[in-house]
Image (spheres, grey):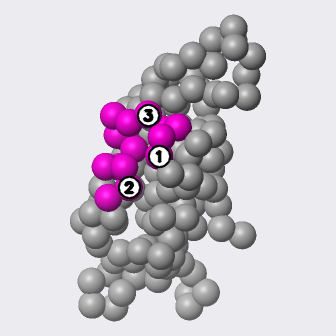
Amino acid sequence: MSDLSLEISKDFTFDAAHHFGHKDEDHPFSRLHGHSFAGTVTLRGRPAADSGMVRDFWEIEAEIEKIRDQLDHRLLNDVDGLEHPSLEAIARWVFERLDPALPGLVAVEIRRPSCGEKAMMRRG
């Protein structure tokens, strides 16, 4: 059993606007528009002997909230590092900011549920 690990995930949401400058001026996505985004952060590890937990969900939520505050009800194009805010770019951006704070981070998925779209940044 020593080669087994657990994965745990925490979901979060945010609402934000964006536009895509690489589209023609008359393309609908070049205009400002918004989405309700959903995300999932996944960590992998072995449960601690004293608690049985890979990581306390409250600690994960606290780190996610720091990121969420930078995205929620914002124009994503104005967020440093998200000048081209595709789902892929948002997933990478969130992963890179959570990685130092959440040992065992293996994936960040960002979704636009109303569009049926998602992107995942996964380690390895």
Count of residue discs? 3
Range drawn in magenta? 66-79
Q: Which of marks 2 and 3 is nearer the N terminus?
A: 2
Badge 1: how crowded within 10 Å, few (<14), some, or many (20+)? few
Can you give x and y, in whole percent of width and height, for residue 88 in the image? 65, 45
Of callouts 2 and 1, which one flags the residue occurring earlier in the amino acid sequence? 2
In the rendering, at what x and y percent does residue 108 appear?
A: 54, 55
Image-based side of 30 in relation to 73, left or right: right
Q: How crowded is mark 3: few (under 14 residues within 10 Å), some or many (20 or more)?
A: some
Label 2 or label 3, whichever lies nearer to me, is 3
Amino acid at the residue labelled 3: Leu
Q: What element carries label 2?
A: helix
**Quick check: 2 left or right of 54?**
right
Q: Which amino acid does label 2 sit on?
A: Ile
Query: Where the C terminus falls, by quadrant?
Result: bottom right
**Label 3 residue SS:** strand
Q: In this view, does 101 lie above or below 17?
A: below
Distance from disc 2 to disc 1, alpha carbons, whole Å, reads 11 Å
